[in-house]
Image: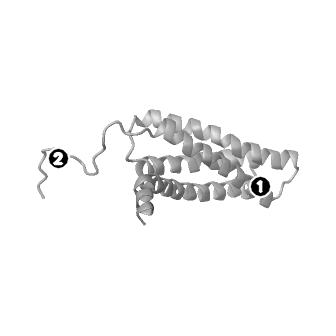
Amino acid sequence: MDLVRRLYDRFASLVHELAKFGSVGAIAFVIDLGLLNLCSVVLDLGPLTSKVAATTVSTTFAYAGNRFWTFRHREQSGLRREYFLFFLLNGIALLFGMLTIGFTTYTLNLHDTLSLNIANIIGVGLGTLFRYWSYKKWVFLEATAPIPLELPETGVRQDR
């Protein structure tokens, strides 16, 4: 039992961070999948254009969720810098989805909705591995000083 406790103590922050990252990612995935199908099936935009549109919207949601919830305990190195890097790295991760969808549609010649969705799921899975690693490495940096859980006293009195 002592071993389990020590393992939990050692990896608790990582487990919590992964759970939050996964929750934000799951919601972003639903947004991505829904918009991909809306753009592709209903609006008939084409599979790659639909993927870019869906990823743009889901990435915006994911940035807000990860910045203000998943990685809020990490150093904040500037909204512009983080936002730029976040979208740059998501652009790289988008390539995984574009390659799997492009391969499925244009090489395997599978144009049905099920094949599009399976290719999208594979691409999102590969992209997620890259995104988690790259966000921790370049976007949401480790705090150089402990970040307080509560806001510091400002000395300004608020009358009710």
What label does residue 116 carry, if any?
Answer: 1
Viewer-closest of 66 and 145: 145
Residue at horizontal 39 percent and vertical 47 percent from the top: 72
In this view, the residue farthest toward the front is 2
Q: Is residue 33 above or below residue 78?
A: below
Q: Relative to residue 51, is residue 156 drawn left or right?
A: left
Q: Residue furthest bottom?
A: 1
Q: Is 149 drawn above or below residue 94 in the view shown?
A: below
Q: Give amino acid for label 1.
A: Leu
> Within the image, what quadrant is residue 30 found in?
bottom right
Q: Residue, x 44% and y 34% (percent of image)? A: 80
Q: Is residue 6 visible?
A: yes
Pick the quarter of the image with the N terminus.
bottom left
Residue nearest the observer in this picture, 47 or 71: 71
> Which callout, 2 or 1, points to the residue nearer the camera?
2
In percent of width and height, residue 17 lies at 46, 53
Q: Which residue is identified by label 2?
A: 153
Residue 102 image position (x, y, % from top left): 79, 44
